[in-house]
Amino acid sequence: MATGGEADREALAGGMANAGAVFRRGALVERPAPRNARALHSHLLALKEHGFDAAPTPVGPAADGREQLTFIPGDVALPPFPPWVLTTTALESVGTLLRRLHEAGAAIAVDTDDEWPLDLADPEGGTMLCHNDVCPDNVVFRDGRAAALIDFDLAAPGRPVWDVAMTARYWVPMLDPVSAAALYPAVSDAPARLRILADSYGLSARERAGLPGVIEQATEVCRAFVSRRVADGEPVYVQALADRGGWERWDRMQTWLADHRETFAAALLD
């Protein structure tokens, strides 16, 4: 159980849905518990049993009903992202870390009847639990390399390639140059970076052939996710949409992905 007062807790920055509501107390993190906390905590513990030690370990509920997880030390990039986010080393390490997560997760039976969130879930479903939100805010780095994943709140059953596509959106990034410039430093060759991510993950030839289309599908799901929250009047999403160029940005981004589909496919398969 949580001990101590306000003076011994540190607010942790980052994220949107839980902004201002995540705190560190020594070796533990306290945060709002998702509705499916029981199933998610069971999965996180199973990941650890299967050798994946790069995720928080659930400890138990806090006194106010929030959840407690182990704190993972390291660096987390927050927007606007620093230059090291786009190093080849960082990108390769994210791909390798995601592969490790999936290899451990493939050995864990997932009850698809549990109430996994559908917000960013793979529309085609699957039997493996995908993280679905491997953005810079949710990756802990040490010495310039991805060391751990945090914030599994949007995890849901899906295909491994879906998680790769969602990860590519943030880490390549799969954004048109105008959109990317708002959050990232100077962006290098997106097709080449997509190939680096696929190589470091170890994506199969069949999955590589379909990846550009899955990225477009993932972008549509992300747009719908934002649209629902804006329609509900959630201030953080309303403000982010306005600050980042509104729906015109999404239109531009989706057009850019479609226009470059063959270029991405060639980079992945050549």
Image (cartoon, rainbow, N blue to C red):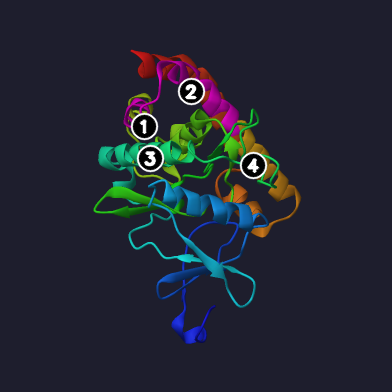
Q: Which mark is residue 201?
A: 1
Q: Residues within 10 Å of mark 4 (few under 14, many from 20)?
A: few
The residue at the point 47 percent across, 44 percent down is: 134
Q: Mark 1–mark 4 contact, CB under 8 Å? A: no
Measuring from the top left, give residue 6's x and y in whole percent. 51, 84
Q: Going from the N terminus, do you reach mark 1 or mark 3 first?
A: 3
- Whether pointer 3 and pointer 2 mark residues with C-beta atoms closer than 8 Å, the reply is no
Q: Residue at x 54, y 41 (%)?
A: 132
Depth check, mark 2 against mark 4: the one in front is: 4
What stretch of residues is rendered in magenta? 195-219
Amino acid type shown at disc 1: Tyr
Q: Nearer the viewer, mark 1 or mark 4?
A: 4
Q: Nearer the viewer, residue 187 or 196?
A: 196
- Cα separation, mark 1 vs mark 4, equals 26 Å
For the stretch drawn in magenta, what is the main secondary structure? helix
Q: Residues within 10 Å of mark 1 (few under 14, many from 20)?
A: many
Q: CA distance from mark 2 to mark 1?
A: 13 Å
Q: CA distance from mark 1 to mark 3?
A: 9 Å
Label 3 secondary element: helix
Q: Nearer the viewer, residue 108 or 134?
A: 108
Alpha-carbon span between mark 3 and mark 2 = 19 Å
Q: Which is nearer the N-term, disc 3 or disc 2? A: 3
| Sooner in the amino-acid sequence: mark 2 or mark 4 | 4
Q: Amino acid at mark 3?
A: Arg
Q: Is residue 198 above or below residue 261?
A: below
Disc 2 element:
helix
For label 2, the residue is 211
> Which marked residue is nearer to the observer: mark 1 or mark 3?
3
Residue linked to disc 4: 111
Residue 100 numbered tag: 3
Left or right: residue 33 compared with residue 186: right
